[in-house]
Amino acid sequence: MSIRVLIADDEAPARRKLRAHLAGRPGVEVAGEAADGLQAVEAIRELHPDLVFLDIQMPGLSGFEVIESVGVDQMPTVVFVTAYDEFAVEAFEVQAVDYLLKPYSKERFERALDRALREVGHREDGREAVKSLLDRVLSGRRPLRRLVVRSGERLLLIPLQEVLHLSSDGNYVKVHTPSGVHLLRETLASLEARLDPERFARTHRSEIVNLDAVKEIQPYFHGDLVVVLKNGERVRLSRRYRDRVLGSAESEG
């Protein structure tokens, strides 16, 4: 079985260099390329590579923001490709996360690839290292700020402040915004773990609302309630989650 690799770098010569280095390695297959952060998120979600060479400085989303958008637990093994200063490189070394500092030699690439291939089957340790790296570089963990969704042939960045509510649709999440509904290939539970709990609250096993979008709460049946959003949409609030939503509403009121 071959190891599937994604190359994510906004510079075409850098992608060609990585592809050329990978071409001679038996059992390694280049599954795809991404030229910016948005494409990288989409490619990771669609292609499910085992390994990604991830440039940090890319248009749309940085390499760190790509990981935030995908979620650390959903990420493949990562080798960062960077032209960052010494502080960032020190962070990589302290957290034992591998990186290639541009410009790098073929020998340095081979060492990074060998290490990454060993880690492919043991991703849990690598994920913990990446989590620690994000904490260090981003000065503490922060809630997700934007979502990357597909709209036809385009990829859109949606600020979470524009999201009205989120609803479960199997292995997808429907992202409800004033401009329409978008599908996100992720489960509601995994997305909830990365949302700001001060701004988003679950109202039902299949619904999460943006508390800033709530207009009022009305009685429903059997002790349940209905959350009425500012755009007129109505979302059920079950008894299980009512204290969380009502407590937030009262504290902000």
Image (tube, grey):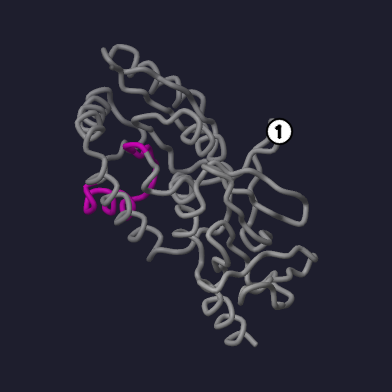
- What's the residue at 28%, 26% (across, down)? 105
- Choose between 176 and 113: the one closer to the eye: 176
- Which image quarter is the N terminus in? top left
Q: In the picture shown, does residue 36 fall above or below 105? A: below
Q: Residue furthest front?
A: 222
From the viewer's perspective, tell me whether residue 124 is left or right of residue 29. Answer: left
Q: Disc 1 residue type?
A: Gly
Q: Which residue is mark 1?
A: 152
Q: Position of residue 40 (x, y in %)?
A: 50, 36
Is 72 within the magenta? no
From the viewer's perspective, tell me whether residue 23 is left or right of residue 15. Answer: left
Q: In the picture shown, does residue 223 fall above or below 175? A: below
Q: In the picture shown, does residue 112 fall above or below 136? A: above
Q: Position of residue 175 (x, y in %)?
A: 64, 51
- Is disc 1 placed on a helix, strand or loop? loop
Say few, some or many: other residues with alpha carbon within 10 Å of mark 1 (under 14 / 14 to 19 / 20 or more). Answer: few
Q: Position of residue 146 (x, y in %)?
A: 58, 54
Residue numbers of the magenta segment: 76-96
- What's the residue at 34%, 52% (across, down)? 88
- Choose between 6 and 19: the one closer to the eye: 6
